[in-house]
C-alpha cells in the first residue's frame, strides 16, 4: 500500500476512484434506522452533508476489507458486511476525479455507544428512519438519497422495479 492520501480533497485529476459505503442499519424502538454521519463544515467537498459512511478503496485493496478499514478509521467500530445493493457514479470537482461508489448493507459489531467521530471528518451523527434520512439534506435529490430509499425498501422486502 502506498502512503498517498485518498480523501475527498486530494487532487486526482482525470482519475477513476473507487469508493464503498455502508448502509449500517438497526431496529430502534420497533423502527428500522440507518446510521448517517454529517460531514464537517470545513470539508471542501459536500460540507455539512449527511452521508452514508465509507471512503476510498486503495489500489489493490479488497473492496469489502477497504470499507471495513474506512469504518474503523472514521468511526472507531467494526461492521459485518452484507451484500452490495447499489452502485452509482459521481464527479468530484474538488478532486477532479470520477468516482464509482458501491453500497453494502452492514450491521454494527458491538454497541452503538462505541461510535466515535473525528472532528475534521464529521461534526455529528445519528440513527434515522427513512423519512428522517431523506429529509436531512436540503439540496436536491441525489443518488445517495435514492440509495437510502432503496435500502429501506429492500429491508421491508419490497420487490424493486427495473
Image: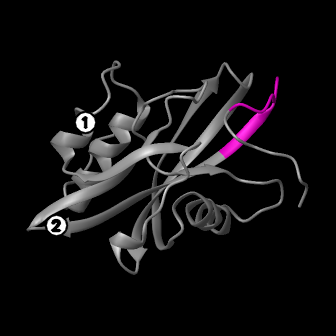
Where is mark 2, residue-wise?
Answer: 28
Instruction: Tell me which corner region of the image, top left, top right, bottom left or bottom right, holds residue 25.
Output: bottom left
Drawn side of residue 155 relative to residue 122, left or right = left
Seen from this angle, which residue lies furthest front?
A: 119
| Residue plotted at (62% across, 66% down) | 64
- Which quadrant holds the C terminus? top left
Drawn side of residue 5 relative to residue 106, left or right = right
Q: Main secondary structure of the magenta part?
A: loop
Instruction: Tell me which corner region of the image, top left, top right, bottom left or bottom right, holds residue 157.
Output: bottom left
Q: Position of residue 7 (x, y in %)?
A: 70, 41
- Kindly state the secondary structure of the residue where label 1 is placed: helix
Q: Position of residue 34 (x, y in %)?
A: 30, 55
Q: Position of residue 1 (x, y in %)?
A: 89, 61
- Kindly state the secondary structure of the residue where label 2 is placed: strand
Seen from this angle, which residue lies furthest left?
A: 30
Q: CA distance from mark 1 to mark 2?
A: 18 Å
Seen from this angle, which residue lies furthest right?
A: 2
Drawn side of residue 38 relative to residue 58, left or right = left
Where is mark 1, residue-wise?
Answer: 134
Dots 1 and 2: beta carbons under 8 Å? no
Q: Which residues are magenta?
A: 9-18
In the image, residue 60 above or below residue 102: below
In the image, residue 53 above or below residue 80: above
Q: Residues within 10 Å of mark 1 (few under 14, many from 20)?
A: some
Amino acid at each position: 500500500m502506498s502512503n498517498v492520501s485518498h480523501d475527498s480533497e486530494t487532487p486526482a485529476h482525470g482519475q477513476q476512484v473507487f469508493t464503498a459505503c455502508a448502509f449500517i442499519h438497526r431496529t430502534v424502538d420497533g423502527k428500522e434506522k440507518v446510521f448517517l454521519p454529517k460531514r464537517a463544515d470545513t470539508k471542501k467537498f459536500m460540507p455539512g452533508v449527511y452521508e452514508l459512511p465509507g471512503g476510498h478503496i486503495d489500489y489493490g485493496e479488497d473492496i469489502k476489507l477497504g470499507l471495513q478499514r474506512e469504518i474503523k478509521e472514521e468511526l472507531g467500530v467494526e461492521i459485518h458486511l452484507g451484500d452490495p445493493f447499489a452502485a452509482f457514479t459521481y464527479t468530484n470537482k474538488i478532486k477532479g476525479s470520477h468516482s464509482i461508489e458501491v453500497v453494502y448493507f452492514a450491521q454494527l459489531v458491538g454497541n452503538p455507544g462505541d461510535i466515535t467521530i473525528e472532528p475534521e471528518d464529521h461534526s455529528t451523527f445519528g440513527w434515522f428512519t427513512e423519512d428522517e434520512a431523506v429529509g436531512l439534506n436540503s439540496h436536491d435529490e441525489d443518488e445517495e438519497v435514492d440509495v437510502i430509499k432503496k435500502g429501506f425498501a429492500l429491508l421491508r422486502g419490497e420487490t424493486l422495479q427495473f
